[in-house]
Amino acid sequence: MTPARAMRYIILPQAVRTMLPPITNFAIVLLKDTAIIFAVGVVEIMALARQLVTETIQSAAVFMVVGVIYLCMTIPMARIAARLERAKQAWQ
Amino acid sequence: MLQLPSLYAENIHRWLPEMLYYCQATLAIAAASFVVAVVIGIFFALCRTSRYGLLRAIAIVYIEIARGLPIVVVLYIVYFAPPQIFPDWNWRWFTTFAGAVLGLGIHGGAILAEVFRSGIEALHRGQREAALTLGMTPAKAMAYIILPQAIRIVLPPVANYAIGLLKDTALCSLIGANELMNDAKSIAFADYQPMAVFVLAAALYFAMSYPLSLGVRYMEKRMSHGR
């Protein structure tokens, strides 16, 4: 095999399986870290929530709803990460 | 970029002492929330590995929720929600410092609970069985046999968490805690020099966290010799 073919057909298919669980975990952390970009003025959930709080003063309700929204995104991703991890361990 | 040196030459005598003062607040928040996180973490790690299904369930719910939320959201909920849910209580003591420590502590507690659990589970069950055979109560076996060894295993990840925690204290500026980032923001906007001030703040954060990470590297090296 040429080195390129070895990489394409032998190394990468195995490496990707090993890399997938940590990459998924990183994606979860990244998703959670997006919650701070409102600090530089990007409009996302947190920016909207803060605006809602200034309008309604219902900070407890608004931020808890925001929390539930984030959980709806991160918990399924964590499930997928755990499954990939189990699949990796079964394969190794 | 070119005027940065002259900006610092002009202003550093005003900026640096003030920012160094607020570095203390940053370190205080980090240290206090580390203690809170360790206490919460040990408690929930013990619940998570308990024989009782209810305790395990409570620990799982707590860990999943606190780990699934961004730290900012935890801080906002912890700091803003309780006074609104219980408006009749006295919240005078609940300063931004207390909110920051509690928020970071709750978030870190879930991370450390998982770390401690992996440490407890990494020990062979025979350790516990041997301790029980020697007539120790389960609590004594945990305190004298399991935990001392588990702590040795989890020390490196806990130290890494501590470094991350120091950097995460910057988020507490968002709930108005008086720490380095908040001070940097107020100086930056007062003097219209955001870049110079934030670069200085970055240098101060680096000066605090880099010695810590060197220490962790040294500790990891030493502990790998021991086994």
Image: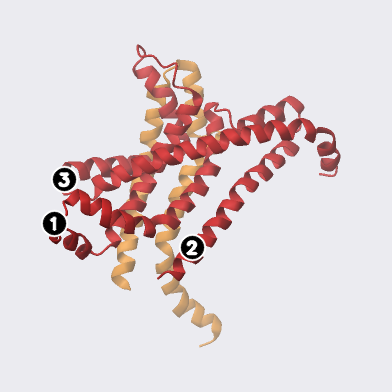
Chain colours: A orange, B red
Say whether disc 2 or disc 1 marks the residue closer to the N-terminus.
1
The amino acid on which the numbered mark 3 sits, given as a three-letter code, is: Gly
Q: Quadrant of residue B199?
A: top right
Residue B5 shown left or right of residue B160 in the figure: right
Q: Are marks 2 and 1 on the same chain?
A: yes
Q: Is residue A42 visible?
A: no
User: At 76% from the left edge and 27% from the top edge, which residue is drawn?
Assistant: B191
Picture layout, residue B177 above or below residue B131: above
Reading the image, the residue beneath label 3 is: B53
Percent across and percent down for residue B133 are 13, 61
Q: Residue at x 39, y 23 (%)?
A: B81
Q: Is residue B95 left or right of residue A73?
A: right
Image quarter hosting the C terminus of chain B:
bottom left
| Mark 3–mark 1 CB contact (< 8 Å) | no
Give residue A40's position: percent from left, percent from top: 61, 35
Few, some or many residues within 10 Å of mark 2 (<14, 14–19, 20+): some
Residues at marks 3 and 1, CA–CA distance in whole angstroms: 26 Å
Outermost residue on the front side: it is B135
Q: Which residue is mark 2?
A: B220
Q: In the depicted view, which residue is nearer to us: B173 or B204? A: B204
* Residues at circles 3 and 2 in contact by the CB criterion of under 8 Å: no
Instruction: Decide which of tag 3 and tag 1 comes sooner along the chain.
Output: 3
Q: Name the residue beneath numbered marker 1.
A: B135
Measured Cα–Cα span from mark 3 to mark 2:
35 Å
Query: Tag 1's secondary structure?
Result: loop
Is residue B61 placed above or below B184 in the rendered structure? Answer: below
The chain to which mark 1 is attached is B
Q: Does B121 appear above or below B8? A: below
Q: Nearer the viewer, mark 3 or mark 1?
A: 1
Question: Position of B64 compared to B94: left or right?
Answer: left
Element marked by disc 2:
helix
